[in-house]
Amino acid sequence: MPIPSKTKSLKAKYYLIPAAACLIAMGVLCYYYFMMPFLASAEKQYVYIDEDDTPDSLYAKLEPIGSAHAVTAFRTLMRHSGADSRLRTGRYALEPSMTAIDVFRHLRNGQQEPIRLTIPEVRTMPQLAARLAQKLMLDSATIASSLTGDTLACLFVPNTYEVYWNVGIDAFIARMRREHDAFWNANRRAKAHNVGLTPNEVCTLASIIDEETANEAEKPMVAAMYLNRLRIGMPLQADPTVKFALGDFTLRRIYNTHLEVESPYNTYKYPGLPPGPIKIASVKGIDAVLNPANHDYLYMCAKEDFSGTHNFARTYSEHLLNAARYARALNQRGIR
């Protein structure tokens, strides 16, 4: 006997209502897990993935900053997509508006946010390696092994650059070379030629000037004095180069015993410029060499008022008087 159509309709409704309820429940759950904000706070967060990270360590980094349900959704997406078997290193910015799906896509596709990396005016390449290792995924030993050579400090122009946290050492060096070449444009190269120096020699002299004075306005004066010495073949006799040769930058007075150090950086023993910079030269120092003052001074000595500036002299006898005044001031202050 056929089932009445009314009965069929009732049975269909009987099954459709629970099915619809299940679909709604599943939709709500999916929305809750996958479409709600991932972060537990309203502040932007960063997650760093390095070469040693595993899926578990990544989840451990996300759990303190993400909502529990969102991290669960993220785990599900990673596992079912196979992305957990090929983590991509990098520094990832997580915005408050991002969902678990957004975070998954960012990490899966390697959509990093660059960092602002400042090249500091440090004295040695090991110091630079240590500072860079604090900001990049690279370790200091890897960086230091690539930062060798007397003139390598000339490669770096102090500035702030945008780079990716996981940049490789070769790519980083290549980037710094491009920035170096852009800095040494035709105008600066022409000025270097006019003072009789190569760009590397300009950086070397600028590094000495930076150590001689922190007074920006005085740097062209100091630059001109050293250029005058170079032109006549007079030794530079720059105290900062002796400190560099000794590896002791804390010295406040240079004695005759210090001048005996055997090093090509000892500009009391060896005429001309040292083999390379004694620090990463500042842009102000470089521009002082390229735009020196116009004078005929050959000597300088720190002023006895400890202002950080210098007395300049044309003759050695004048210089000795300046040096005597400064020595008395040091003795009065007990500076040895």
Image (cartoon, helix red, strand yellow):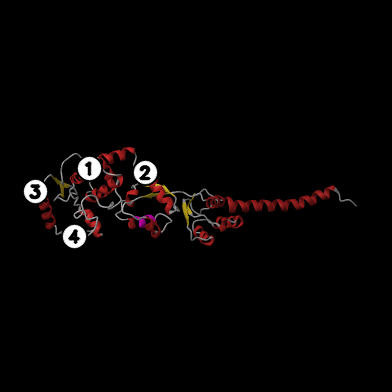
Position of 103 with respect to 174 (left or right) is right
Is 130 included in the stretch rendered in magenta?
Answer: yes
Position of 85 with respect to 51 (left or right) is right
**Crowdedness of circle 2 by 10 Å Cα count: few (<14), some, many (20+)?**
few
Q: Position of residue 144 (x, y in %)?
A: 37, 58
Viewer-nearest residue: 302 or 262: 262
Please tell me which of labels 3 and 2 falls first in the chain.
2
Q: Position of residue 47 (x, y in %)?
A: 48, 55
**Crowdedness of circle 1 by 10 Å Cα count: few (<14), some, many (20+)?**
many
Q: Residue pushed farthest right?
A: 1
Cα separation, mark 4 vs mark 1, equals 29 Å
Q: Would you name the residue on which mark 2 appears? A: 181
Please tell me which of labels 4 and 3 falls first in the chain.
4
Cα separation, mark 2 vs mark 4, equals 38 Å
Kindly tell me whether residue 248 is visible in this rendering. no
Q: Would you name the residue on which mark 1 appears? A: 220
Viewer-nearest residue: 32 or 246: 246
Instruction: Give me the residue at 28% from left, 39% from top.
Output: 191
Cα separation, mark 1 vs mark 3, equals 24 Å
Q: Mark 2 falls on what kind of element?
A: helix
Please tell me which of labels 2 and 4 falls first in the chain.
2
Q: Amino acid at mark 2?
A: Asp
Q: Amino acid at mark 4?
A: Glu
Q: Would you name the residue on which mark 4 appears? A: 260
Label 3–label 2 contact, CB within 8 A: no
Position of 144 with respect to 166 (left or right) is left
The part of the chain drawn in magenta is 128-132
**Crowdedness of circle 4 by 10 Å Cα count: few (<14), some, many (20+)?**
few
Magenta: main secondary structure: helix
Cα separation, mark 3 vs mark 2, equals 44 Å
Q: Amino acid at mark 3?
A: Ser
Label 4–label 3 contact, CB within 8 A: no
